[in-house]
Amino acid sequence: MNPMALAHLAAGLGAALAVIGAGLGIGKLAASALEAEGRQPEAASQIQTTMIIAAALIEGIALFAEVICFLLQTK
């Protein structure tokens, strides 16, 4: 098998895993935040702020992983 074909396959799988991991992470984050808001509604604004910051960090890591996969694919 062509080594470049394997590189493309590996980059595609890595990108898919990064997206799946980010989706699972944000889903768990949102579920936990909604549960916390349900238990303590007066802290909703503080919980939302923390959730947005954490979601941005998760998305940043996922984007970084995607860029690495695309760079590996072009080499």
Image (spheres, helix red, strand yellow):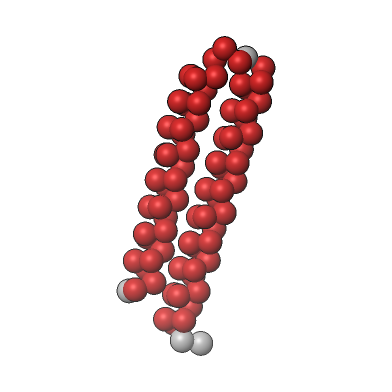
Return the residue found at the far top.
42
Please tell me which residue is depicted at 57% across the width and 35% down the height of the picture: 29
Is residue 46 or residue 22 the one in the foreground?
A: 46
Q: Which quarter of the rendering shows the C terminus?
A: bottom left
Q: Quadrant of residue 25?
A: top right
Tell me residue 18's x, y (percent).
50, 55
Tell me residue 42's x, y (percent).
57, 12
Please tell me which residue is depicted at 53% across the width and 61% down the height of the picture: 16
Please tell me which residue is depicted at 46% across the width and 33% down the height of the picture: 52
Q: How many marks?
A: 0
Is residue 70 or residue 33 the one in the foreground?
A: 33
Please tell me which residue is depicted at 63% across the width and 34% down the height of the picture: 31
Tell me residue 27's x, y (percent).
60, 41
User: Does residue 36 sit above or below 54 in this rendering?
Assistant: above
Return the residue found at the far bottom.
1
Tell me residue 28's x, y (percent).
61, 38
User: Does residue 75 sit above or below 22 in this rendering?
Assistant: below
